[in-house]
C-alpha cells in the first residue's frame, strides 16, 4: 500500500523519492553514489526530526484522520484472539459503525466495543463514516451489561468524528442513548479501559469513553467539538481550524497535562499508518498492563475511583486579585 503524504509531509516524501532514485541509479549503472546517498539520508533524518518533532495540534488532527491509519478492526485482528462479533441492540437494528463483540486479550476474555470507519466510499457508506446511530450505543450498552453479568472487563476503541446527527438519529433519541451510556458506564461493576485510537469527537466518543483508564494514541485527539466546527462558530469561517485546534487543547500531550487521559500510547515516527504491527504491539502491551492493574482493585474501590476521576474534570480555581489590580 503506497503511503499518501499529508501536505506538511511532502518535503519528507520528496527526499525519500530522491533517495530511492539515487539507489536505483547506482544499482542499475554500477556507479558509486555512496556519498550522495549518505548526504540525502542525513538530510532525510533531520527533516523527519524537524517535522515530526514539532507537530502542531492541527497537524496531529490530520494524522488522526489519515485514510490509511489503522482502524479498530485492524487492532482487533492484531491485538486480540477469538474475536466473535455480536449484533443488534434488540430494539431497532445493528449499527455497522460500531462493530462490537467478545475477544481474548492474552488470557483474559473481554467485551470489546469499537467505532469503525471505511477506507473507500463503499465502506464509508456501510460504516456511516464511523458516526454511530442510537442503536450503536444501545448495542454497546447491551454488551457491556453482558460483560457485567459474567464479570468480563470492557475495552472500548474510540475513533469517531461524533455521533450521527441526522433526522433518523434524532428521532430515535441519540442524546438519550449517549446519556444513558454515561450513567450506566459510571456504575458498571467491571473494569473498563477506553483507548482513543484516532478521532475522539464529542459525545459520540464519550458515549463509550467512561472508563477506569483512558488511553490515547500519540497522534489521536479527544475534543468536545471538531476544530472546523469550533472555527465556524467562533470565526464564522472554517478556515481558522488550525487556530481552533490549538485553543481546544485536544492533543494527547495537552490532555495528559489536564488529566483527561491517563496514558499516551506511542506511535511510529510519522504516525500509526506507517507500521500497523508496531502500533498494534504498543496498544496490546498498554491494554494488558492497565487491565492487570485495575483488575486487582476491589470493585467498590474501582467504582469510587471512576466516579471521582470524572468529577474532577473541568474543575478549576480562580486566582485572588492582587492588591494592585484591586486598586485599579
Image (spheres, rainbow, N blue to C red):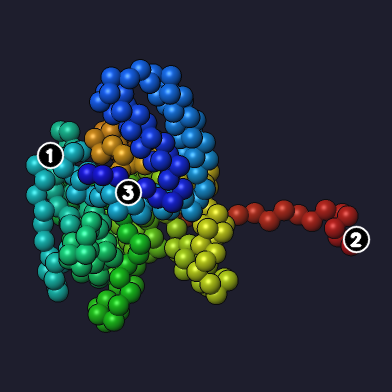
Residue 233 picture location, percent across and down? 53, 73
Per the model, the C-alpha gap separating discs 2 and 1 is: 67 Å
Image quadrant assignment for residue 235: bottom right
Viewer-nearest residue: 242 or 279? 242
Residue at figure coordinates x 20%, y 67% from the top left = 125
Viewer-nearest residue: 163 or 302? 163
98 shown above or below 221: below
Around disc 3, counting alpha carbons within 10 Å, would you say few (fewer than 14), some (14 to 19), or many (20 or more)? few
167 shown above or below 317: below
Query: Which of the numbered marks, if any, corresponds to residue 327?
Result: 2
Residue at figure coordinates x 31%, y 28% from the top left = 25
Residue at figure coordinates x 47%, y 66% from the top left = 228
The answer to whether residue 8 shows anywhere in this view is yes
Q: Residue furthest right?
A: 327
Viewer-nearest residue: 126 or 192? 126
Under circle 1, the secondary element is: strand
Q: Which residue is mark 3?
A: 4
Under circle 3, the secondary element is: loop
Q: Which residue is mark 1?
A: 81
Q: Earlier in the sequence, mark 1 or mark 3?
A: 3
Viewer-nearest residue: 57 or 1? 1
Is label 2 in contact with label 1 (beta carbons under 8 Å)?
no
Per the model, the C-alpha gap separating discs 2 and 3 is: 59 Å
Residue 12 picture location, percent across and down? 42, 39
Residue 217 picture location, percent across and down? 37, 43
Around disc 2, counting alpha carbons within 10 Å, would you say few (fewer than 14), some (14 to 19), or many (20 or more)? few
Residue at figure coordinates x 11%, y 53% from the top left = 85
Under circle 2, the secondary element is: helix
Nearer mark to the viewer, of 2 and 3? 3
Query: Which of the numbered marks, if any, corresponds to residue 186?
Result: none
> Considering the image in quadrants, where does the N terminus appear?
top left
Image quadrant assignment for residue 321: bottom right
Amino acid at each position: 500500500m503506497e503511503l499518501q503524504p499529508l501536505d506538511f509531509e511532502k518535503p519528507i516524501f520528496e527526499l525519500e523519492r530522491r533517495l530511492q532514485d539515487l539507489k536505483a541509479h547506482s544499482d542499475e549503472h554500477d556507479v558509486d553514489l555512496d556519498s550522495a546517498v549518505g548526504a540525502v539520508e542525513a538530510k532525510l533524518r533531520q527533516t523527519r526530526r524537524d517535522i515530526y518533532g514539532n507537530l502542531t495540534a492541527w497537524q496531529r488532527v490530520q494524522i488522526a484522520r489519515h485514510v490509511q491509519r489503522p482502524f479498530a478492526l485492524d487492532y482487533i485482528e492484531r491485538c486480540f484472539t477469538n474475536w466473535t462479533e455480536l449484533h443488534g441492540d434488540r430494539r431497532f437494528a445493528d449499527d455497522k459503525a460500531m462493530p462490537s463483540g467478545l475477544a481474548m486479550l492474552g488470557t483474559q476474555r473481554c467485551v470489546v466495543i469499537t467505532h469503525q470507519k471505511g477506507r473507500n466510499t463503499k465502506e464509508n457508506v456501510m460504516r456511516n463514516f464511523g458516526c454511530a446511530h442510537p442503536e450503536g450505543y444501545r448495542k454497546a450498552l447491551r454488551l457491556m451489561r453482558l460483560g457485567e453479568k459474567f464479570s468480563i472487563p470492557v475495552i472500548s476503541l474510540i475513533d469517531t468524528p461524533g455521533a450521527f446527527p441526522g433526522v433518523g438519529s434524532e428521532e430515535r433519541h441519540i442524546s438519550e442513548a449517549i446519556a444513558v451510556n454515561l450513567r450506566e458506564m459510571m456504575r458498571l461493576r467491571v473494569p473498563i479501559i477506553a483507548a482513543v485510537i484516532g478521532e475522539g469527537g464529542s459525545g459520540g466518543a464519550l458515549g463509550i469513553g467512561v472508563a477506569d483508564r483512558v488511553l490515547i494514541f500519540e497522534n489521536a485527539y479527544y475534543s468536545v467539538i471538531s476544530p472546523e466546527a469550533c472555527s465556524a462558530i467562533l470565526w464564522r469561517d472554517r478556515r481558522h481550524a488550525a487556530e481552533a485546534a490549538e485553543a481546544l487543547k485536544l492533543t494527547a500531550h495537552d490532555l495528559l497535562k489536564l488529566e483527561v487521559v491517563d496514558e499516551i500510547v506511542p506511535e511510529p515516527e510519522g504516525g500509526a499508518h506507517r507500521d500497523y504491527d508496531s502500533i498494534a504491539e504498543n496498544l496490546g502491551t498498554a491494554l494488558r498492563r492497565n487491565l492487570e492493574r485495575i483488575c486487582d482493585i476491589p470493585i467498590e474501590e474501582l467504582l469510587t475511583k471512576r466516579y471521582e476521576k470524572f468529577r474532577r474534570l473541568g474543575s478549576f480555581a480562580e486566582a485572588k486579585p492582587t492588591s494592585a489590580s484591586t486598586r485599579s
